[in-house]
Image (cartoon, rainbow, N blue to C red):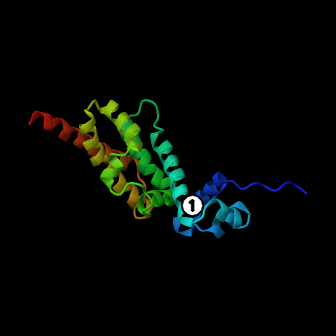
Amino acid sequence: MPPKTRVTEDNIIKAAIEVIRQSGFEKINARTVSEQLHCSTQPVLYHFSTIDNLKKAAYRQADQLHTQYIMNTPPGQDPILGIGMNYIRFAVEEPQLFRFLFQSGYAEENTFLDMVDSEKLVPVLSAMQEGAGLSRQKTRDVFITVALFAHGYASIIANNRLEFDEKLIAKHLEHAWNGAVLAATQEDIL
């Protein structure tokens, strides 16, 4: 008889991510995750005392996947536009994970500005600051404009309300970026 496969906390989180990808975060429960693992519900309930705890762990994992995805910009591409397009592209390729991350209420930050000021965003802001040559505060201001623009596009796409037209969206994102940078630099002149 082959040895029993040990179901770990990490395996359970990965299975939860797969359930989300296939069916949405609303379908996360002990049964759906255990079916994904081909095991009973006992290991899921052993490692996670509540399904809410499992969803929070899956959220952290999905957030890491999202961060890796958006930061993977091609060499030579403007980092800000690359990050913005990757954010939108993530919504195209992973609509269920996108909805889980940004429309489920599981974010640790309570508001958009909490997210902008979180330590997790430092690598994104640093890449933008380097690319734009702006101060940290002006980079933050530009980021808010571009992030809201990109999030709007991504949300509409993830909810199947708009077809992804990469060239058109890239052009709009670049206009938003240029306008935000221009506004930030003109504040110095005024």
Q: Residue furthest right?
A: 1
Q: Residue at x 40, y 55 (%)?
A: 154
Please name whichever residue, 57 or 177, is drawn nearer the observer in this view of the structure.
Answer: 57
Locate residue 149, reporting x and y percent: 31, 52
Does residue 3 appear in this view?
A: yes
Query: In the shown orientation, is residue 85 left or right of residue 182?
Result: right
Q: Amino acid at mark 1?
A: Leu
Q: Is residue 75 above or below residue 63?
A: above
Q: Residue at x 47, y 55 (%)?
A: 92
Locate residue 112, reporting x and y percent: 32, 54
Residue beneath label 1, please?
54
Does residue 148 appear in this view?
A: no
Q: Residue furthest left?
A: 190
Locate residue 146, reporting x and y percent: 30, 46
Q: Quadrant of residue 77?
A: top left
Locate residue 34, reporting x and y percent: 68, 65
Q: Count the numbered circles shown.
A: 1
Query: In the shown orientation, is residue 3 left or right of residue 9?
Result: right
**Residue neighbourhood size for the residue with mark 1, other residues' Cα within 10 Å, grouped as few (<14), some (14–19), many (≥20):** many
Q: Residue at x 29, y 47 (%)?
A: 144
Quarter of the image with the N terminus is: bottom right
Query: In the shown orientation, is residue 77 left or right of residue 30?
Result: left
Helix, strand, or loop for circle 1? helix
Q: Is residue 34 above or below residue 75?
A: below
Q: Residue at x 25, y 43 (%)?
A: 141
Quarter of the image with the C terminus is: top left
Please name whichever residue, 43 or 64, is drawn nearer the observer in this view of the structure.
Answer: 43
